[in-house]
Image (tube, coloured by chain):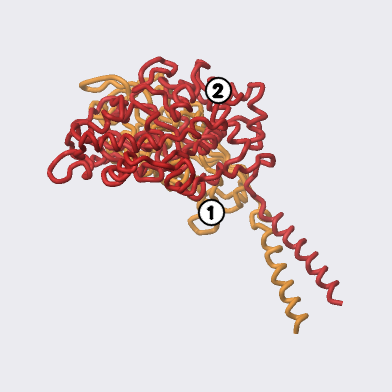
Amino acid sequence: MLRRPYTLLVGLLSLYLFFLASCTGEQEEVSPMAESFALGVPANLATSVPYPDRNPLTHEGVALGRMLFYDPVLSKTGTVSCATCHQQEKAFTDGKALTTAGVSGKPLLRHVPSLVNLAWMPGLFWDGGAKDLESLSFGPLTHPDEMGQDLKALAQKLQQHSQYPQLFKKAFGTDSVTSAAITRALAQFQRTLISANSRYDKYVRHETGGDLSELELEGLTLFQEHCSSCHATGFFTDNSYHNNGLDSSFSPDHEALAYGRGRISGTPEDVGKYKTPTLRNIALTAPYMHDGRFQTLEEVLEHYSAGVVYSASLAPELQQQGRLGIPLSPSEKAKLIAFLQTLTDESFIQNSAFSKPQ
Amino acid sequence: MKKAGLNYLLLLMALPLLAACSDEEATAPAATVQVELQNMVGVQPLQLDASTYTSPAGDTYVVSNFKYYISNVKLISSKGEATFLEPESYHLIGGEGKTTFELKEVPAGTYDKIELSIGVDEAHNHSTDQVGDLDPSNEMVWDWDTGYKFLSLVGTYTGDTGNGGLVFHVGGDVNYKTLTLDLPQALNLRQQPNATLRLQADVNELFQNPNLIDFDVMHAGGHGAGPSMIAENYSNGFLKVVEVK
C-alpha cells in the first residue's frame, strides 16, 4: 500500500528538480571531454594543488600546456620555446646570468627563475608583478627580447595549425584558439611541476633513501637558525619580498626595474626588495640572485657573511647586533652547502611527464 | 493531518516553479539601446595623426592612437522605476576597438541617466586571461604588473620648453572611475524601443578639470600620481551624452 505513493512522490520530485534546473539557465559550460587531473602532493609540502575556478586541471589541458611549453611556434621567429630558457635538467633554468636566448639576442635584465611549485606562489616574476600563472605567460610571450610574439598572430598561427585546434577543443570544449586558452593550458602544465622528492624530503618523511650525513644534518641546523626565516622550509621560500643587501643604490633606469618590488607596489619601503627564491634544486640553478651575479653557492654564502651592503630597505635579519650580514665560518659554510645539495630532486628533473612530448 | 501536510509541501514546492520561470523581463517588452561614442577635441572630431591640437595648457599635440575601456554600463531611472545593468559589460572604445555598442534586452521604462565606468573593475583587473574586449591581444594590458590599461593615449607634443613623445597609459584600481551622466532628454523605451544614445569624449578634458596638465611637466606615465591626475580629469567632464535619438 505504501509503495505507490512513494514511487509517485519520487517521480514528482525528480520532475520538480528537472524543472528547477532547467529554469536556472546560465550554467558554466564544462568541457565535456576533458578529464579532471588529480595531482598527488607530497605530505610535507601541502595537501592539495590550488588552482583558480576558471582553470581546473585536466589531463587534456596539462597535455596541451606541455606541448605548447616545448613548441617554438610560440615565438615570433619560430625558434624560441618556453623550454629554451626553462630547461628541465636545470630545474627549468638555463644556467646563464642574463640570458641572450630570446628572439632579439639581447641580454634580458633579470635572471631566468626556476619553475617549481608555482601553484603555491601568489606573485610571480622576481618582483611578484604577475598576479597569477594564467596572466604570467603573456609577459615572456610578448616581450621583444624574449619570444616577441604578437598575441593575435599567435592565436591565428595555432588556429591554422594541423593539430592544435583539436587539442584546444579536447582541453577547453571549443576549437577556437584564444590568448586566454593558450596561457590557461600553459598554467595547467606549470602547476604540475611539483618538486618535493629530494633526499631532504625523504629524510623529513622518514622514507628510505632519506639518510642525511652528519655534515648535512649540521648544515640543516645552521640553515634553520640563519636562513629559514625567509627560505621557510617546505617550499624554501616565504613567497615574500626582501632586500638582501646586494646594492646600496637602485637605478631609476629601465622604468625603475632595479626598484624590484618597489616598482610594483609603488612604495619606497619596497625599493630594492625581491621575491625570496625557492632553494629547491638550488645546486642545479646557478648562477644566483635576480641578476645572476653570483656563479656559485660559495659566492652566495660569502655575500651573506661578508658582502651585505646597507640601504634603507635592508632586511632586519641581515643587520643584527650592530653588524651587517650573517657571520659564518668556513666550516659553517661548507655544512650549509652540503645541506643545500640535499634539496636536489632527481625524480623532478627526470620525470618524463615534464619532458618534451614525443 | 498527514495528507494536509503533503499538500502543503507540494504547494510550497510549486512556488519556485512559478517564480523561476516567469522573469519580469520576459513579460515586459524589452528594447535595444544603441550607444555611440565619438572622440572629440573640443568641438572637432578627433583625427588621428592628421591634426594638431592645442591643449588647455597651451601646448600643441598630435594623437596617433587613443583607446579606453567603458565598462559596467547601467541605465537608471531617477524615479526608481527601473535600472538596467548590462551583463559582461566591457567595451574597448577607439583604436582598433569599437565606436558603438548595443545594450540588449533593456526592460521597458523611462530612463534619464546612464552610469558607466572608465577602466576595468577590480574583480577583472588582476588577471588578463580573458576574452572579447578584455583579450590581452588588444594590447591594453601590462604583463610585468598584471592589469589593464584603462586609457591609452599615444602621440607627440610640442611644449614651451620641449617636445617629443606623448604616452599616457592610465590604469590601477584607484583610477577606475564611475560616472553618472544625465541624458539631455528622458529615454522612454515604451515609445522608442530602438533608441540611440550619442556620447562624446573630449580629449582636451583629459588635460584639465581639475588638473591642468602641462606637457612640459608631464608627457608620459602609467602608474602613480601623474596618471591619477588624468583619471581625476576623465571622471569630470570628459564624457557627456549629447543626444538621445
Residue B45 appearing in the image? no
Label 2 element class: loop
Question: Picture quarter containing residue A172?
Answer: top right
Q: Amino acid at mark 2?
A: Asp
- Which residue occupies the extreme left position in the image? A322
| Left or right for A341, reference A169 | left
| Left or right for A296, reference B106 | left
Q: Residue at x 46, y 48 (%)?
A: A205
Question: Picture quarter containing residue A241?
Answer: top left
In the picture of the structure, the residue carrying the numbered disc 1 is: B83
Q: Amino acid at mark 1?
A: Thr
The residue mark sitting in front, 2 or 1, is 2
Bin the neighbour count of mark 2 within 10 Å (Cα to Cα): few under 14, some 14-19, many 20 and up.
some
Residue B22 appearing in the image? yes
Q: In the rendered view of the protein, which quadrant contains the N terminus of chain B?
A: bottom right
**What chain is colored orange?**
B
Front residue of B158/B192: it is B158
Q: Are marks 2 and 1 on the same chain?
A: no
Badge 1: chain ID: B
| Left or right for A257, reference B72 | left
In whole angstroms, how far apart are the C-alphas of marks 2 and 1? 49 Å
Front residue of B76/A262: it is A262
**What chain is colored red?**
A
Label 1 element class: strand
Front residue of B212/A9: it is A9
Q: Is residue B216 above or below residue A328?
A: above
In the picture of the structure, the residue carrying the numbered disc 2 is: A71
Front residue of B146/A235: it is A235
Residue B224 point in image, percent of width and height = 30, 37
| Left or right for A231, reference B245 | left
Q: Residue at x 39, y 23 (%)?
A: A95
